[in-house]
Image (cartoon, grey):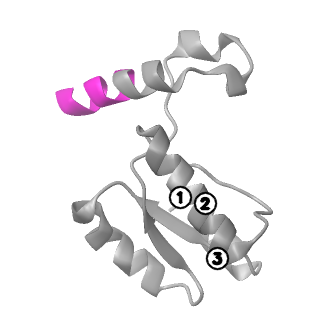
Amino acid sequence: MGHRPELHQAGWRLAITYQNERLELEARDLIAEMPGAAGFMCDVTKDDEIARLFDELKSRCGVLHGLVHSVGFAPPEELKNPFLNTTRAKAFASRMTSASIR
């Protein structure tokens, strides 16, 4: 699961996000393994849910000192510019299409 164990061992309080109720079931095990971790539902394809998540994190945690987003995917042509300029809509549409083919 990526950097999760190292970050938790280093003392980070982790917020684990999941897209929907079905994925919440899988996330529960991850959250239970790490004392102090919390789970939040957030469909990152929806701007209002991202805003709600950050409002909730700010309310519960105050300042965020780091963020690891591990849902990332972008078509190669999107990465010709700085990463922050990657268009989310195009990347998600491409990822969803490739995921449904598998």
Q: Is residue 97 above or below residue 72?
A: above
Whether the residues at callouts 2 and 1 have beta carbons within 8 Å, the answer is: yes
Q: Name the element at disc 2.
A: helix
Q: Which residue is mark 2?
A: 55
Estimate the spatial distance between the alpha carbons at disc 3 and disc 2, rounded to whole Å.
Answer: 9 Å
Q: Residue at x 76, y 59 (%)?
A: 66
Q: Nearer the viewer, residue 61 or 80?
A: 61
The crowding category of the residue bearing disc 2, from other C-alpha atoms within 10 Å (few below 14, some 14 to 19, many at least 20), is few
Query: Which amino acid, by three-letter code, is at mark 3?
Result: Arg
Question: How far across and how far down the image is residue 10, in percent?
Answer: 77, 78
Label 3 vs 1, first from the N-terminus: 1
Which quadrant holds the C terminus? top left
The crowding category of the residue bearing disc 3, from other C-alpha atoms within 10 Å (few below 14, some 14 to 19, many at least 20), is few
Q: Nearer the viewer, residue 21 or 3?
A: 21
Query: Which amino acid, by three-letter code, is at mark 1?
Result: Leu
Label 3 vs 2, first from the N-terminus: 2
Query: Which amino acid, by three-letter code, is at mark 2?
Result: Asp
Q: Is residue 94 left or right of residue 39?
A: left
Residue 97 shown in magenta: yes
Magenta segment, principal secondary structure? Answer: helix
Q: Is residue 86 above or below residue 63?
A: above
Residues drawn in magenta: 94-102
Q: Which residue is mark 1?
A: 53
The quarter of the picture where residue 82 lies is top right
Residue 6 appears in view:
no
The quarter of the picture where residue 57 lies is bottom right
Q: Which residue is mark 3?
A: 60
Q: Is residue 70 left or right of residue 83?
A: left
The quarter of the picture where residue 41 lies is bottom left
Q: Is residue 97 left or right of residue 72?
A: left
The crowding category of the residue bearing disc 1, from other C-alpha atoms within 10 Å (few below 14, some 14 to 19, many at least 20), is some
